[in-house]
Image (cartoon, rainbow, N blue to C red):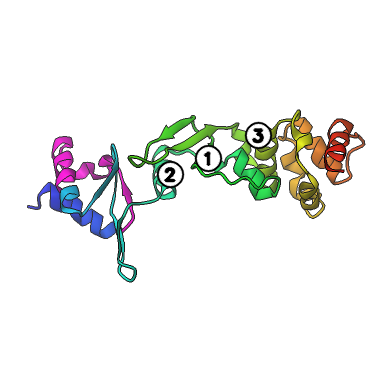
Amino acid sequence: MDSVEKKIERILVEGGEGKVYFPDDFFECGSEKAISKALQRLVARGVLMRMSRGIYCVPSYDDFWKIGPCPAGADDVLEKFRSRDGFRTAPCGCEAQNMLGLSEQVVMNPVYSTDGPSRRINYRDGFRPIILEHVPQRIFNYKSRILMLTVLALEEIGPQDLWEFDTERLEEIYTQVPYEDIREDLKATPKWIREIILQMQGRSNKKFNKYEGRRKRNFA
């Protein structure tokens, strides 16, 4: 009969390099105590890498560049948590601004919007944690990714500070987006953002002078 260590090692070999694991992934291999001891031995042998408490991965190697052992990345760890806990993620507000061309600021930390609870995932000792910021469920119901990014970006900026941003890039985007592609999504969009988008598409009778006037003065 195979030992707990052998059973786990067989699972690791089948999974391949770079895959992330939680101890519970091996619940069929033995008791909790036996699994814990087996994981310790596999880490000592270099078969497995302990990234942080309760997070392990099979290290990867690059034979050509002679690089390794390398741990899994933040995206791989996040995908593992998404799969286990059933939450969804989207870019954070600052990242959405960058993706839309409203800002050149690059988000250096792994920050995401989520429909799950706000939390920090310490995925690797000595590294910045993955930060999850809760946003309303409606964000993930948008069929239009452009509109989803717009809502995330503008809600991060806020109506009072929107005048500081050059929104011409956003206007260029929405002159290219067919109205029918976003019509249903607009029903669930905050009113102030919906009116801005409608104005950009020439479908609103309202004039956002408090935004437009400030923007023109700021970027004249």
Label number found at residue 156:
3
Magenta range? 16-41
Q: Residue furthest right?
A: 205
For image coordinates 81% across by 38% down, the residue present is: 196
> The residue under label 3 is which amino acid type?
Glu
Are the residues tagged 1 and 2 within 8 Å (C-beta)?
yes
- Residue 157, visible in the rendered structure: yes
Above or below for 101 versus 16: above
Residue 143 at x, y percent in the picture: 66, 46
The residue at which mark 2 appears reads as 78
Amino acid on which the number 2 mark rests in the picture: Leu
Determine whether, in the image, residue 45 is placed left or right of residue 164: left
The question of residue 106 being in magenta is answered with no
Amino acid type, callout 1: Tyr
Decide: few, some or many residues near mark 3? Use Cα within 10 Å; few <14, some 14-19, many ≥20.
Answer: some
Please, is residue 128 above or below residue 181 in the view? Answer: above
Residue placed furthest toward the left:
1
Against 154, residue 29 (above or below) is below
What's the CA distance linking mark 3 and mark 2?
A: 22 Å
Residue occupied by mark 1: 112
